[in-house]
Amino acid sequence: MAVKSKAQRRKFAELLVQGKISPETFEEWNRGAGDAELPERLHPRKKAKSKRGAKAKRGGKAKRGGKGTRARVR
């Protein structure tokens, strides 16, 4: 098989330096990619969504406490 991204190629090189894979295995995987321009990552990371949601986008006046803001008790 061949490496599919630059990140994967770096990971295999790290495993080779640590001695967890043989040089032959590394060369086999690296050779399979050939001279192709590989993407940095196969599946780019998604952007994090904001926690606040739609309320964070709305501008406007801040709520004030004061007369008439609480429910009246009869």
Image (cartoon, rainbow, N blue to C red):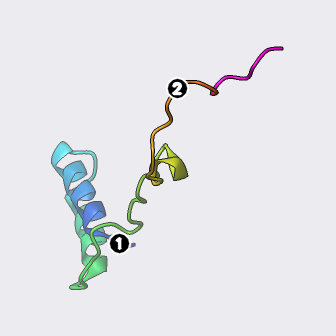
Quadrant of residue 43 in the image? bottom left
Relative placement, left or right, of 16 versus 44 is: left
Relative placement, left or right, of 55 versus 31 is: right
Q: Residue at x 19, y 43 (%)?
A: 18
- Which residue is more in the foreground, 59 or 34? 59
Q: Is residue 31 visible?
A: yes
Q: Mark 2: which secondary structure?
A: loop
- Label for residue 4? 1
Quadrant of residue 46 in the image? bottom left
Quadrant occupied by the N terminus: bottom left
Residue type, numbered disc 2: Gly
On screen, 26 above or below 63? below
Q: Mark 1: which secondary structure?
A: loop
Label 2, residues with CA under 10 Å away: few <14, some 14-19, many ≥20:
few
Relative placement, left or right, of 12 versus 1 is: left
Where residue 11 appears, x then y in whole percent?
26, 55
Quadrant of residue 74 in the image? top right
Q: Which residue is mark 2?
A: 65
Instruction: Name the magenta segment's main secondary structure.
Output: loop
- Which residue is more in the foreground, 51 or 15? 51
Is residue 8 inside the magenta stretch?
no
